[in-house]
Amino acid sequence: MSIFTTQQELILHFREHPPQTFSILQVEYPHTSLRAQDWITQQDAVLIQFTHSLLTTQVDLSGVTPYVLLHFDESKQYLGASLSLGTAPGSFGIVAQSQQVLLLPFDSSLPIQKITHFSLNS
């Protein structure tokens, strides 16, 4: 099982707001557990597409702060968000049920509640 990566431009679409474009590292990830810190050291914004056949993926967010993890289905439709904002030492992780997750540095001006979907700029 190989991991494939590419540089991309991702466009986040919103209700009642103009789209925002991000330069991202796109990762096709075949494993059922992910250490997020390994990927954000390469680039701040990372889109991870899970290619395994299980329903969930364990995402270790230890040391990844302040970040937001945006969840999307296989059709690129927005499902929800998880925040990694803490400063306490120790481990922190979530179980993701989504097919794709976007790791972004946390920005309080990003209207997370109005995200509808994303597209890739080819």
Image (cartoon, grey):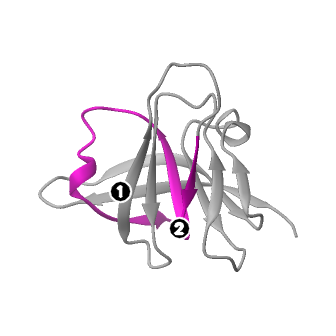
Side of 19 where 94 appears, left or right: right
Point 29% across, 60% down: residue? 13
Q: Nearer the viewer, residue 47 or 8?
A: 47
Residue at disc 1, secondary structure? strand
Give above or below for 10 relative to 85: below
x and y percentages locating residue 35 in the rendered image: 71, 44
Q: Magenta stretch: give its range.
A: 93-122
Sequence-wise first label, 2 or 1? 1
x and y percentages locating residue 81 in the rendered image: 38, 52
Residue at disc 2, secondary structure? loop
Q: Quadrant of residue 38?
A: top right
Point 61% across, 68% down: residue? 56
Q: Is residue 55 magenta?
A: no
Residue, disc 1: 12
Point 53% across, 67% down: residue? 97
Q: Quadrant of residue 14?
A: bottom left
**Nearer to us: label 2 or label 1:** 2
Q: Is residue 116 magenta?
A: yes
Point 69% across, 73% down: residue? 51
Residue, disc 2: 97
In 3D space, how far apart are the residues under numbered discs 2 and 1 (Cα atoms)?
A: 20 Å
x and y percentages locating residue 33 in the rendered image: 73, 56
Residue farthest to the left, as pictured = 16
Give above or below for 97 relative to 110: below
